[in-house]
Amino acid sequence: MIAAILSIALSLVGTIFGAPADPVFKLTDNDFDHFLKDKETMLVDFYAPWCSDCARLKPEFDKAANDFARKGKFVFAKIDCFGEGRSICENRFNVHSWPQLKVFRRGQYAGEYSGNQDKASIERFVSSLIKQKVPDNIGQDQPQENPSAIKENPYGPWYQNGWTYTAVSPGNVPYQNPPGWKRG
């Protein structure tokens, strides 16, 4: 009897002091960016509640999340593409098939998981992500605010803005090849 009471008390203490009851965090349109921005690595399940493939993935995803939670690593999240996460799914990530497992590093989209949808494969993938060092400048993918900081590309009429190049020409006319130009 005392052992049972002690066991229940210890499990409650673990829940109260930091360990969430469900190691898969449920994200919404309102908290998506705020939640992910300071997480070094997260694997997010973009799902539809009625989807049979999502239903098959859920127990495997949850088992992997529980295994990582026992090690003190909370790196799994999910977003309901037909509920409170609809805008993020449709407008931001153009998700129209389910499930999709997307990787985020410090809040920035970093790719997709397309491997087997079993616990062992998901755990291997996430373990390899955790071992990789996240570059310090990964959060610097924002456009530069100072227009004088835009640099001309020496290889053509493209201008660097952050990590991307944008085609421009005088008068904002789409770039065209010069007269007489032929593909070599």
Image (cartoon, rainbow, N blue to C red):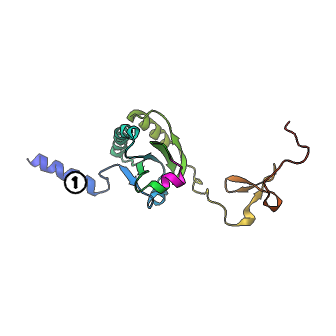
Tell me which secondary structure the magenta stretch mostly adopts: helix
Indicate left or right for 16 with 24 as reference: left
Q: Is residue 80 above or below residue 30?
A: above
Indicate left or right for 104 with 117 as reference: right
- Is any part of residue 106 visible from this angle? no
Stretch in magenta: 88-95
- Is any part of residue 39 visible from this angle? yes
Depth order, front residue of 9/90: 90
Q: Where is residue 41 in the image (x, y as percent from the top left)?
A: 48, 48
Q: Where is residue 120 in the image (x, y as percent from the top left)?
A: 40, 33
Q: In this view, does 180 lie above or below 33?
A: above
Name which residue lies at 60% across and 54% down.
Answer: 137
Q: In which quarter of the image is residue 122?
A: top left
Secondary structure beneath dot 1 equals helix
- Quadrant (top left/top right/bottom left/bottom right) for the C terminus: top right
Indicate left or right for 145 with 7 as reference: right
Name which residue lies at 49% across and 58% down.
Answer: 33
Depth order, front residue of 78/3: 78
Amino acid under disc 1? Leu
Q: Is residue 117 above or below residue 159?
A: above
Q: Mark 1 points at which residue?
A: 12
Q: How many labels does the image show?
A: 1
Looking at the image, the residue that sits furthest to the left is 1
